[in-house]
Image (cartoon, grey):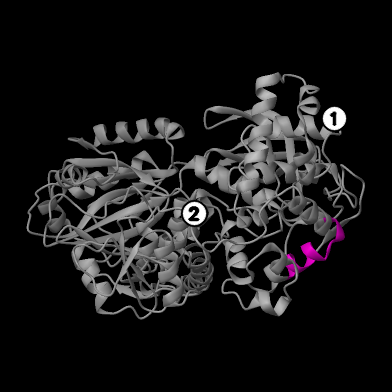
Amino acid sequence: MKDVADMDLKKAEKRINELYGIITELNRNYYDLDAPSAEDDEYDALMRELRELEAEFPGLAREDSPTKRVGGTASSTFEKVAHNVQMGSLQDVFSEAELYDFDNTVRKEITPEYSVEPKIDGLSVSLEYRDGVLVRGSTRGDGFIGEDITENLRTIKSIPLKLPDRLPFLEVRGEVYMPRASFAKLVAEQEENGEQPAKNPRNAAAGSLRQKDSSVTGKRSLGIFIFNVQQVEGRAFTRHSETLDYLREQGFPVVAHTVCKTIDEAVERIREIGEEKHGYAYDTDGAVIKVDVLAQRDILGATAKVPKWAVAFKYPPEEKETRLNEIEVNVGRTGALTPVALFDPIILAGTTVSRASLHNQDIMDRLGVAVGDIIAVRKAGEIIPEVVRVAKHCGGEAYRLPDKCPVCGHPIEKSEEEAAVRCVNPNCPAQLLRGIEHFASREAMNIEGLGEAVVKLLCESGLIHSCADLYELNMQDILTLPGFKDKSAGNLLKAIESSKGNQPDRLLFALGIRGIGRRSAELLLRKFGSIDGVMNATEEEILSIDMFGEVLAKSVMTAFADPQMREIAERLRGYGLKFDYDKAAESDGFAGLTFVLTGTLPTLKRDQAKEMIENMGGKCAGSVSKKTSYIVAGEEAGSKLTKARELGITVLTEDALLKMIQEAKE
């Protein structure tokens, strides 16, 4: 028997070591790189196996076991923050029987009431307030050390910067999430640009919060739910539910919570959340059950990793199997080919779905998918259908994207720098359609009335073959299109004519150069002064702009090396569109506002930033006072920044200032 026991011990030790390595790598991918490499249920199964082995062989459990640690580590990109109160995780349970086991354990020490809440699937953060003013926000990190992401958190509109009740100190914990609608929009944009799409809303939210440029974070429409008071001075509470009610009064978006007097009531509420969650505007990956009375929590205590007074119930992922009937290939405005799975209709998260993006060839290769296979489908963020795996292969050949564009027949190309394959024919009808839609879009030339349907009519009728042709349209042309009358045709022509007054950074963005957004277009114009300057710039000159790397620089060079692009640019100039960047503002949008500049800004010199503010009608002061409207802070900002935070003055990064200027101009 001893030999068998020794053998079992050796097997257990080997498997525990394997699980340590696997889970540690998965944690790194999930928490630190925001790039999950396993599904949640796969990860949960590995953690459960490890816990069971450690329980059976306690002598093999190590202090650095993943079961005793929160997964993340603080990134070197942001300043480190030490958490005075550990931001721990919760013990996961997967069945109602385990919920009753939890209740039985708790009742050995206390007679509990429970607070039951949805478990928001996002990134856990801490918010610290002194005298009612937000002074710092940070990520969880490993529970003890996180990252200072204050400026990015300030862009989330639902986070209050000042509280009505100015307690000496208050630290709350919440979950930042990306709404499903915002996630769908982001993925659509990434697919359109041929970029690797975000895997799920949690991954997208985490990546958005870790942006170096806070203006990017601000565009992602993030939300937050507060679910705990970590520390408080100047006020006492007796119940967790009381703290949430108080926080709601202070203007925080607070997680929905129900106080249940028995475990039966708590289990019933968890069932209800499971039925309701498909209708939520955000992702939930479970429900949380917590002892409500705070003094009872102290009696129960905690382990090194998790509290003993709460558990998280994880709902099983909803997947449906269906037959893959066809793979459709769509062509975007940048020429990227996107494969789309068409399958027998199924009901997921309360809606009928029959198609899902397969993204790119790399993902199809990983799945090994072929037409005729039985595939497993679920909804990422419970909104975007995705093919998870092949449940049963039909024996057919794995699908490969075509060698030629399905729209124009031009050979496709693939670079080593990206997963997408592209049609590089500038005359491809699909690219023309998507390109003109982009040109007319709100963020670009903002031509009202020129949506997808109208663009399609114009292209199919042969009235336009490039964005420049828009400026040759006349009343007679538009009246030939179905559905147009004198008034609607006149309105469209007026909108096209009005777009000529847009600043050239909009035009540069509208031209659809791969990778060039509004912000990078503005940086190019500020550097070179005109679209002509950008067209004639060298790669080295473009690389001298902060935020521009080789990929973007080459993209600009390639675009303007194309004779057709230059011809379009010359035609647009001839129609009266603006090519010269007007550094003097056309607005007094900053009238009555006082700014203070401090520290070293990323791209602007102090006098440049001052000139831009004054051109907008604002005033620059040398010191911070109660009359200061904003402080613009760069690296090594000193006492001015400290005083501004003490006074509750809004702190802007350079990017946030530039965004304010752009919005004021518009």
Badge 1: how crowded within 10 Å, few (<14), some, or many (20+)?
few
Mark 2 vs 1, N-terminal side: 1
Q: Nearer the viewer, residue 397 or 569?
A: 569
Between 561 and 64, the residue placed more toward the observer is 561
Residue under the image location 45 percent in, 57 percent down:
661
Circle nearer the viewer, 2 or 1: 2
Is any atom of residue 198 visible in this view? Answer: yes
Amino acid type of disc 1? Answer: Ser
- Describe the element under mark 2 as helix, strand or loop: loop
Q: Amino acid at mark 2?
A: Glu
In the rendered structure, does residue 591 fall within the stretch colored magenta? no
As drawn, 230 above or below 290: below
Q: Residue at x 78, y 46 (%)?
A: 468
Residue linked to disc 2 = 586
Determine the main secondary structure of the stretch shown in magenta: helix
Relative image position of residue 490 (x, y in whole percent): 67, 26
Q: Can you tell which mark lies on residue 633? A: none
Q: Residue at x 72, y 65 (%)?
A: 532
Check disc 1 and report the residue beneath it.
Answer: 461
Pinpoint residue 15: horizontal percent, then vertical percent: 52, 69
Q: From the top left corner, tell me how far across and down residue 195 is, in percent.
A: 67, 56
In this image, 449 relative to 60: left or right?
right
The residue lying at 14 percent from left, 44 percent from top is 242
Residue segment shown in magenta = 554-564
Residue toward you, 271 or 596: 596
Which quarter of the figure has residue 274?
A: top left
Q: Is residue 272 above or below residue 31?
A: above
From this view, report whether residue 620 is shown above or below residue 450. Answer: below
Q: Residues within 10 Å of mark 2 (few under 14, many from 20)?
A: few
Name the side, left or right, on which 113 lies relative to 579: left
| 3D distance between C-alphas at marks 2 and 1 | 39 Å
Q: Dot 1: what SS? A: loop
